Image: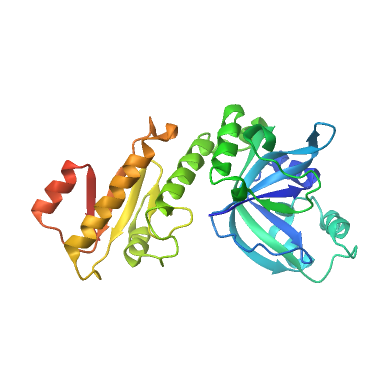
């Protein structure tokens, strides 16, 4: 899991906000250092120029987007594919903006592009110092927020939740989820807790892949893991029990143990006081009636996949 705070041009951000864009092509000069750890679903927060306070020394975070994919493109390709989702009303304005931030003051043959989705803007900036984060005022590009603590992302979202979504963005798009901050906080906390009981480097579960294909409701991988799925309504966590285990009972005992640890950990998170999690095992193994009864008694559902 990773979250990045990126110094952004206020004019570009204002353009996206004014148009209510929930998707953007977040471009970067090709000369800039590449991200070492940034995966689909990770958060990119907009640390915007023009929001400075305390004698112009501290920039505010004005929103975020979720990283979807990365591409290297020419200016022409960028404009043809994304148009105004690049943050400017014309190709010439986009070229001028790229020229200003490039060290050689040229557009260049290629530009690094990050496709961001689920973009949200805050009603008021969140200043890092308000939540115990100190970002140097001379930061030129980006910083990993996780180095300030594993709860940094949660703290930003909780602070933003108090003032809410930007009123203009909300008015521009009535389909915008008003509970997005709450849902993202819950997703991030679950991801953090799951990473402590399930190896995040473990490859994608085949049974969960099949389940996602056949599941009519909206489910997604837990951030940073391919071993758990999440559905927001109702809040449901899906975990796999695969048939390649030599000792089926032992594998089930271990999975129950992990669920028990998760349940205990979430008791200490205030966001889950009114948000009960439904735990569901997706099993390739046909479980006995006795096992199914035991699992029901401890509030664990089973779906045979």
Q: Quadrant of residue 271?
A: top left
Residue 25, position as x, y percentages in the image: 68, 56
Residue 61, position as x, y percentages in the image: 69, 40
Q: Does residue 22 appear in this view? A: no
Instruction: Residue lying at the far right in this picture: please name it.
Output: 105
Q: Is residue 301 left or right of residue 69?
A: left
For the image, the number of numbered tags is 0
Q: Does residue 112 appear in this view? A: yes
Closest to the observer, 267 or 8:
267
Closest to the observer, 16 or 136:
136
Q: Quadrant of residue 169?
A: top right
Residue 298, position as x, y percentages in the image: 20, 42
Q: How is the image coloured?
A: rainbow
Q: Is residue 277 left or right of residue 161?
A: left
Closest to the observer, 16 or 184:
184
Q: Which residue is at 25% across, 57% downward?
A: 254
Q: Which residue is at 37% across, 41% downward?
A: 265
Q: Is residue 72 left or right of residue 215?
A: right
Q: Is residue 266 above or below residue 194?
A: above
Residue 42, position as x, y percentages in the image: 56, 53
For the C terminus, give its image quadrant: bottom left
Q: Is residue 32 above or below residue 275?
A: below
Instruction: Residue lying at the far top in this picture: please name it.
Output: 162
Q: Which residue is at 15% across, 58% downward?
A: 287
């Amino acid at each position: 899991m990773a979250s990045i705070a990126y110094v952004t041009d206020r004019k570009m951000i204002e353009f996206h906000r004014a148009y209510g864009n929930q998707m953007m092509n977040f471009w970067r000069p090709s000369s800039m250092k590449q991200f070492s750890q940034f995966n689909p679903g990770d958060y990119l927060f907009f640390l915007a120029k023009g929001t400075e306070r305390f004698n112009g020394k501290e920039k505010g975070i004005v929103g975020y987007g979720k990283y979807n994919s990365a591409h290297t493109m020419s200016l022409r390709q960028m404009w043809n594919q994304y148009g105004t989702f690049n943050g400017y009303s014309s190709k010439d304005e986009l070229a001028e903006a790229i020229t200003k931030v490039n060290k050689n003051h040229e557009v260049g043959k290629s530009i690094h592009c990050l496709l961001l989705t689920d973009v949200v803007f805050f009603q008021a900036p969140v200043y890092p110092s308000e939540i115990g984060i100190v970002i140097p005022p001379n930061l030129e590009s980006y910083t990993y927020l996780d180095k300030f603590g594993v709860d940094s992302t949660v703290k930003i979202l909780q602070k933003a939740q108090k003032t809410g979504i930007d009123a203009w963005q909300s008015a521009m798009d009535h389909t915008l989820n008003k509970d997005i901050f709450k849902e993202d906080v819950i997703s991030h906390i679950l991801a953090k807790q799951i990473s402590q009981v399930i190896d995040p480097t473990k490859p994608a579960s085949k049974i969960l892949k099949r389940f996602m294909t056949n599941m009519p409701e909206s489910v997604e991988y837990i951030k940073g893991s391919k071993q758990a799925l999440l559905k927001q309504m109702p809040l449901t966590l899906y975990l796999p029990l695969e048939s390649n285990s030599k000792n089926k009972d032992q594998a089930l005992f271990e999975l129950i143990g992990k669920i028990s640890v998760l349940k205990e950990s979430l008791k200490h998170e205030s966001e889950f006081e009114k948000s009960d999690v439904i735990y569901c095992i997706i099993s390739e193994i046909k479980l006995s009636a006795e096992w199914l009864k035991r699992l029901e008694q401890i509030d664990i559902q089973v779906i045979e996949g």
